[in-house]
Image: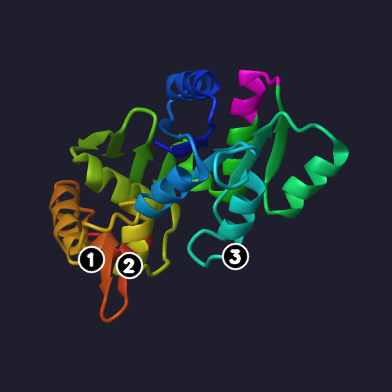
Amino acid sequence: MSRILVVEDESAIAELISINLRHAGFEVTIAGSATQAQYEVDRVLPDLVVLDWMLPGQSGVALARQWRGAARTKELPVIMLTARAEEGDKIAGLDAGADDYITKPFSTNELLARIRAVLRRKAPEALDSAVEVGPLLLDPGTRRVSREGVEVKLGPTEFRLLHFLMTHPERVHSRSQLLDRVWGDHVFIEERTIDVHVKRLREALERVQCARMIETVRGAGYRLTQQSSALSA
């Protein structure tokens, strides 16, 4: 499930967007100001931000520019949704780092289509398409993991962890990278917590002889391998 941050100071519009996004299967957080938006991004890095231009305290354009200049948020997908419809405004928004620019009044169906399009370009792993690596099949839509029809029972955290690893197979991920991408960079979670969830994930995958697909790379982190030689006999 993709996390969407809606930054909009008009509560009626924010609620309209939120309802439609939740109905489409997204997890939504609302921020009514630039300060609150920055707080939410610092707390949990979203998969995409829907950003208004006119905000209390700081403009959305300034906020987008600020995010593009920071290492942690430079790849954060941003869609500007604003009443400012002049060509110069659109150019300024896109130059500030927005991935797309939509003017008000807007169609909620178009907004959803634009969000999906940006996520496909920026973060394909965030979409609800099934992922298959080796013998494992993961379906985000039904929240199921299986091997040859045999279902693997996973908790929500282990599911998100496996989803991320399966959408980035063969790549080594440090604990801090996993913390940022799977847990949302939550400041109250220690990196060693990841070891506990990896252990739980392996125990669950052992039931379908796939535990050895999760490899520990000493001094570096973890990776998921799709090589058949890594599977348990």
Query: Distance from label 1 to label 3 (Cα)?
Result: 26 Å
- Amino acid of disc 1: Glu
Determine which quarter of the picture holds residue 130: top left
Tag in front: 1 or 3: 3
CB atoms of marks 1 and 2 within 8 Å: yes
Residue under circle 2? Answer: 176
Determine which quarter of the picture holds residue 155: top left
Q: Quadrant of the N terminus?
A: top left
Tell whether 25 sits left or right of 92: left
Tag in front: 2 or 3: 3
Taking the spot 54% from the left edge, 25% from the top edge, the residue there is 10
- Vertical position of residue 10 compared to residue 214: above or below: above
- Amino acid of disc 2: Ser
- Vertical position of residue 173 compared to residue 217: above or below: above
Residue 189 seen from this side: yes
Residue under circle 3? Answer: 69
**Magenta part of the protein: which range?**
105-113
Query: Distance from label 2 to label 3 (Cα)?
Result: 20 Å
Nearest the eye: 70 or 220 = 70
| Label 1 neighbour load within 10 Å: few <14, some 14-19, many 20+ | some
Determine the secondary structure under disc 2: helix
Extreme-right residue of the structure: 87
Q: Which colour assignment does the render follow?
A: rainbow
| Label 3 neighbour load within 10 Å: few <14, some 14-19, many 20+ | some
Q: Position of residue 185 (x, y in %)?
A: 34, 57
- The reply to whether the magenta stretch includes residue 106 is yes
Instruction: Tell me, for residue 191, which label it has, or none.
Output: 1
